[in-house]
Amino acid sequence: MTEAVDDLVLVINSGSSSIKYQLLDPDSGTVTAAGMVDRIGEDNAGIEHKADGETTERREAIADHRAGLRLIFDTFAETGHDLSNAGVRAVGHRVVHGGEVFYRPTLIDDSVVEAISDLSALAPLHNPANVAGIESARQLLPDVPQVAVFDTAFFHGLPDAAKTYAIDAKVAAAHGIRKYGFHGTSHEYVSGQVAELLGRDPARLNQIVFHLGNGASASAIRGGRPIDTSMGLTPLEGLVMGTRSGDLDPGIIAHLVRSADYDIDQVDRLLNRDSGLKGLSGVNDFRELRGLIDKGDAAARLAYDVYIHRLRRYLGAYLIDLGGVDAITFTAGVGENSPDVRADALAGLSRFGIEVDPAANAAKDRTARRISPPDAKVVVLVVPTNEELAIARAAHRVAETEK
């Protein structure tokens, strides 16, 4: 068992059918334990918990998020890290949508929980699950400060021209319709890491960050603050994703309703769960997609080409928005692990000072690194994201302020 640390943060990311968690030191980033409860609501649900070099797995029915949190706490205790006396200083909760209400890490009380719940109309797949995790954690650790950290917060101050949709202004105001952006915790963390790696003042850097996972987003960052991002009112807008369409002609929705008798739930499922790489190729895992391409599958090849085309379109738009770029960074599962995506997204751009060194790009390295030639005008980097550490640090700052 590792030596106890008296200033830890428990980070909880409560999804629609899963709960991811880490117990870590916000200063050093050292992780004491981490794991995930998955398939909540199913008979074959379970937990995978890693601590002290050991992995504990259990499969059993988990009725709801409260039962899932209870199983997490029980597993911590069974593996020698009882959370009631483990030195937990704060609990940091990832919350997807903060709307116009929340734009900084926020100490949770009953009114905050109610407000997050009220925002569920803007994130129906995410905020209800976030609330369920918050309510359960508050019951299990009632004396520990609980802090909400919002995916949308980093993009709260987008310029009006970037965040405004060209629809009836009264309708937009009445229903909170604007670009909010998501993955903000990751974009903020990674852009900060880039400045440190380059030894540059972030106020003097123009950056483009590609967060490429099953969900994917891009951001244009000037002087440490975002001026645009690809996701919008919801996490559906923007890049092609694992199961999400990204940008499309909104007339497609009316066409499906009129010509195919789709109702709103069918449209929602199509665009969020059955589109993107999955809709085009049948798979949403990039490793499977690559395997199909290697076997000559034409649908998989097209899916990949559409994915790259959309990346390059946003890259070009953000180059213009920024008036030039100093650094382009790839992060998250696909961004960190697919050299083909990085190379193809930036191919043929040497006239703009953008190049990728093939050997550096292909190197199997899990650390933050430069993959552009030393003399390239634009630095291209791979920087692993660490949203849990960012949430932990934000939660710890709030908890210390409340002492």
Image (tube, rainbow, N blue to C red):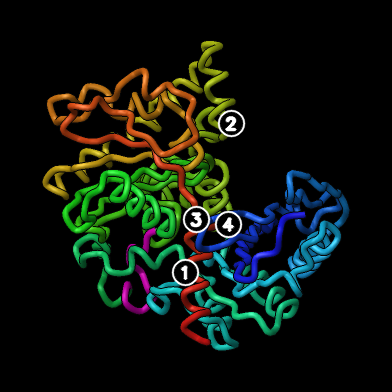
> Which residue is tagged 2?
283
Q: Residues within 10 Å of mark 1 (few under 14, many from 20)?
A: many
| Cα gap from disc 1 to disc 2, whole angstroms | 36 Å
* Callout 3 touching callout 1 (CB < 8 Å): no
The tag earlier along the polypeptide, 1 or 2, is 2
**Which callout, 4 or 2, points at the residue further toward the start of the chain?**
4
Q: Mark 3 touching mark 2, by CB under 8 A?
A: no
Label 1: state its secondary structure: helix
Residue 259 in view, yes or no = no
Residue at 57% in and 33% down: 285
- Secondary structure character of the magenta stretch overall: loop
Determine whether 242 is above or below 25 in the image. above
Q: Mark 4 points at which residue?
A: 265
| Residue 142 placement (x, y as % from top left) | 70, 83
How many numbered discs sit on the rendered protein?
4
Magenta residues (range) = 172-181
Q: Position of residue 302 (x, y in %)?
A: 43, 23
Pointer 3: residues within 10 angstroms few (<14), some, or many (20+)? many
Residue type, label 3: Glu
Mark 3 or mark 2: name the one nearer the start of the chain: 2
Q: Residue drawn 19% across and 58% down? A: 203
Q: Looking at the image, which is closer to me, 101 or 257?
A: 101
Please give the label number shown on residue 387.
Answer: 3
Q: What residue type is labelled 2?
A: Val
Residue type, numbered disc 1: Ala
The amino acid type, in three-letter code, at marker 4 is: Asp
Q: Which of 8 and 192 is in front in this view?
A: 8
